[in-house]
Image: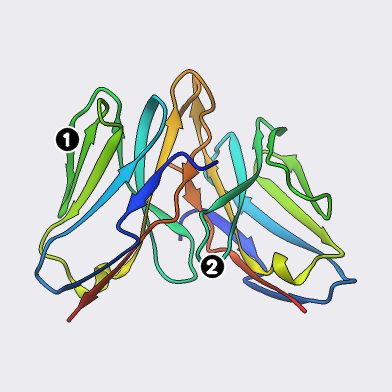
Amino acid sequence: SQQGEEDPQALSIQEGENATMNCSYKTSINNLQWYRQNSGRGLVHLILIRSNEREKHSGRLRVTLDTSKKSSSLLITASRAADTASYFCATALSGGSYIPTFGRGTSLIVHP
Amino acid sequence: ETGVTQTPRHLVMGMTNKKSLKCEQHLGHNAMYWYKQSAKKPLELMFVYSLEERVENNSVPSRFSPECPNSSHLFLHLHTLQPEDSALYLCASSQVIDRENTEAFFGQGTRLTVV
């Protein structure tokens, strides 16, 4: 069964607004990664946050990790139409498999 | 370009055909993966090769047969597929160090249609 589960499944916003997506997982992790997928293409890695980190930034992306709640969030600030894509979280289990497992993703639509 | 190349990009095959998907990575990674992505389903892990040995076979039907001849190449051999096998097949690679995974790099995928 998949480890990460994204929420919401779909998100529709206007350009310039912020977009927040959440990821929940079930067991202890070494790290958590966020990926983006444009329609029908491969996934592209966005950011990796380790289990001992609480927050990480990359450009307009901000990722938080709360290991006590087994959850992470991805915030995209000042969204653009080009941010329209599906976003996935992937987890690597601690003390176990390193294999990244994915959820269903959040489909983000940013209207110009 | 991510350094992971998949061919072909699109494939239409009949249920009695035999075909192969190819994946090549130029990143020097030591792990390669096949994922299946169907509409409205999670990305399903199919096979994992680490240091050219298969380490994961996620209850995949035998009509899918992987092959990893070296650390840079991964194949998925297909035979007698069913229409429900139509999906986007994604290859990925990563560098695994001390069981800690680094970022995975994905190919653009092969869109497979079984008729």
What label sits on residue A55 in the rendered view? 1
Give me the chain letter of mark 1: A
Label 2 or label 1, whichever lies nearer to me, is 2
Q: Residue furthest right?
A: B16
Near-viewer residue (A5 or B62): A5
The residue beneath circle 2 is B39
Determine the residue positioned at 71% across, 65% down.
Answer: B85
Q: Secondary structure at mark 1?
A: strand
> Which quadrant would residue A84 be assigned to in this image?
bottom left
Label 2 – label 1 distance at C-alpha: 32 Å
Left or right: residue B75 versus residue A31 is right
Count of numbered marks: 2
Left or right of A93 in this view: B91 = right
Q: Quadrant of the N terminus of chain B?
A: bottom left
**Three-letter code for the amino acid on which mark 2 is drawn:** Ala
Residue A75 visible within the image: yes
